Image (spheres, coloured by chain):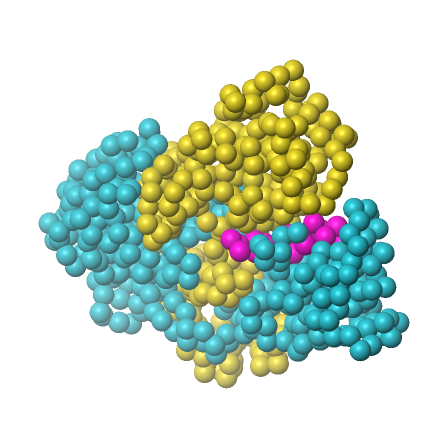
Chain colours: A yellow, B cyan
Amino acid sequence: MECSHFCSKFMPISEPARMETTCSTQFSSFRPLVDVKHPKFTSCKGISPNNIHVLKKGSSSVEQQKLGAADLVYEISGTNSRSLLSRNSRILDAFDDEYGGVIVDSERLPANKYVFASMLRFSVSHWKAKEKKGIWLKLPAEKSDLVPVAIKEGFEYHHAEKGYVMLTYWLPEGPSMLPGNASHQVGVGGFVINDNNEVLVVREKYSAPAFVGLWKIPTGFIAESEEIYTGAVREVKEETGIDTEFLEVVAFRHVHNVAFEKSDLFFICMLKPQSTRIMVDDNEIEAAKWMPLVEFVEQPLIKEDSMFKKVIDICIARLGKRYCGLSVHRLASRFDGKISSLYYNVVDSYDTNCIGN
Amino acid sequence: MECSHFCSKFMPISEPARMETTCSTQFSSFRPLVDVKHPKFTSCKGISPNNIHVLKKGSSSVEQQKLGAADLVYEISGTNSRSLLSRNSRILDAFDDEYGGVIVDSERLPANKYVFASMLRFSVSHWKAKEKKGIWLKLPAEKSDLVPVAIKEGFEYHHAEKGYVMLTYWLPEGPSMLPGNASHQVGVGGFVINDNNEVLVVREKYSAPAFVGLWKIPTGFIAESEEIYTGAVREVKEETGIDTEFLEVVAFRHVHNVAFEKSDLFFICMLKPQSTRIMVDDNEIEAAKWMPLVEFVEQPLIKEDSMFKKVIDICIARLGKRYCGLSVHRLASRFDGKISSLYYNVVDSYDTNCIGN
């Protein structure tokens, strides 16, 4: 939960909508980490409003779930949850988060959707009365029948991953202060050039008609939790079999609305070859080779495209030591207790070719 | 669909799982754009398997949906969709994508979940027979009752935004080649220093106990589709009222598992002040002021943290023109038809203070 300390998103303040993207970290933009797998919060399991205290007397959560699942007469009507209210006047097991919010325990959800509906309604009104802020409801894929119930009760989709969907409910008046979903995908490209001024290039096995025959540098997405500098080396190795050493990020590109209306950050990395023998990955690469830099640059698709031309110019300038890229440095910070990668020019040091030193 | 041309993810090839993150673009890491709002695909509306052709004869999609919604006897049993099969042997309206996949038309989904269940089952087997690859099923929040149906039929969650959840189904053998969800959130910090060597700093209204009293630079998340250079200027303006001009990204930090197991990229931007009068944003900022650089650096929380210390050192080096950051340049590329922001050192130019020139 370290990063959550940094962020005002969960704080009990009403802010105009434009503040939705504001996070008060010093050198971090971390959003609050809601660790729904291993909540580190004070459990408020078993809490229930005073007015229904008598109803749950002597019956455990589990007992009541059994009862709910076993003894209910199912009817298809809009009144199920209401008709079950008296038999399920319990609050869902949940944890308080550090921002006056609540995280429903996704491992202790009622098995029965009608029981869930009545409990969810009771819980929301209870948490509202307690002046709670945001409610986090993580529903595993195997509990997907609870999704329409939650939506009906006023929950909204927040994000989803393969195995679950996360829903949220912002209780206070005013715009939601809950953090948004991830906004970017990150890719890397490896510019690898050897001592003979030959660039490591690949030809796609499956490329759009416009790019057929084009020789390009190896590129790819970084994997989950992968570093940019290791991702670039991995992609080059996977596509061409060439071992490389990461030198610098020489430039990066930022573009929007590329996939599901998300944005894309692409880092062009200068890599130093550590081997020469090419082994093509047949799955996606038709061919790979060492191509004279001049030939590479002379490809119409490269030289006629202002962006690619610029990127190549930068890489060439870097080779001529007329350019200074960002090298990577691993640093710890007490602010979030994490070791992270900081990319910057090496200042006051002479261990690189960079003219900036 | 430009970017989809770049990516091998949708291609009809079987790849090992490790290739999940590989995208074959030249200087882009774009994932295929599945424009579910305005599909630009060949519609295959009305298609149905030959063996049930006679059943749909003379009844339009709309007619059948009406029929399905109006005339069905609802039973709560596992056999609904099967029992309805004969009355709903139709394929869901869908569009072919350019990768041998199918995008279900989310605006023409059956109103009734049992009709949807039988049609979805028929459609999947039909598309399987047609050797289709990935199926994209976008379910708006108002159709959340269809979510458990899709999960039951073998669909998996892909991602979700406020108004919808996207589910996918990979038909071929082997690991899914469909692109993943966004993996990163992006934040910015603005280092603003005036001619008197005073840094623009803020004090959080709501900060973790450890940081109470700390004077920090303005920071925040960039908004959806917002540029890094405009986002930094906006955050500074919002928190302090100071107008600034973006100069350079001097460094960026990459850290993982910060929110919902996503990663975070944080860009430290050097900004030039264009105004002097501070107006604090009461919503999240307790106070803001111009603080002598020396005082700022002397704060224990800064000088005792290796990362923050390094970042400040970089900014100071930049002031002393001993450092070269990345400035922004807007460039068009024919590869995706987009104008994007390329961040790099200005080479062979004399219009900056950067020693790299």
In the current view of this chain or complex, which residue is farthest to the left? B196
The residue at the point 30 percent across, 67 percent down is: B346
Q: Which residues are magenta?
A: B146-167
The residue at the point 82 percent across, 64 percent down is: B87
Quadrant of the frame with the C terminus of chain A = bottom left
Determine the image quadrant of residue B173. Answer: bottom right
Asked whether, in this view, residue B277 is left or right of residue A196, the answer is: left
Residue B184 on image: x %, y %: 48, 52
The residue at the point 67 percent across, 39 percent down is: A80
In the current view of this chain or complex, which residue is farthest to the top? A58
Residue A240 on image: x %, y %: 63, 64
Up/down of A213 relative to B86, above or below: below
- Residue A327 visible somewhere in the drawing: yes
- Residue B153 counted in the magenta span: yes
- Residue B105 counted in the magenta span: no
Residue B196 on image: x %, y %: 11, 49
- Residue B117 visible somewhere in the drawing: no
Which of these two is toward me, A118 or B292?
A118
Which of these two is toward me, A84 or A267?
A84
Which of these two is toward me, B24 or B37?
B37
Up/down of B44 relative to B155, above or below: below
Asked whether, in this view, residue B209 is left or right of residue B97, the answer is: left
Determine the image quadrant of residue B208. Answer: top left
Up/down of A329 relative to B122, above or below: above
The residue at the point 58 percent across, 46 percent down is: A152
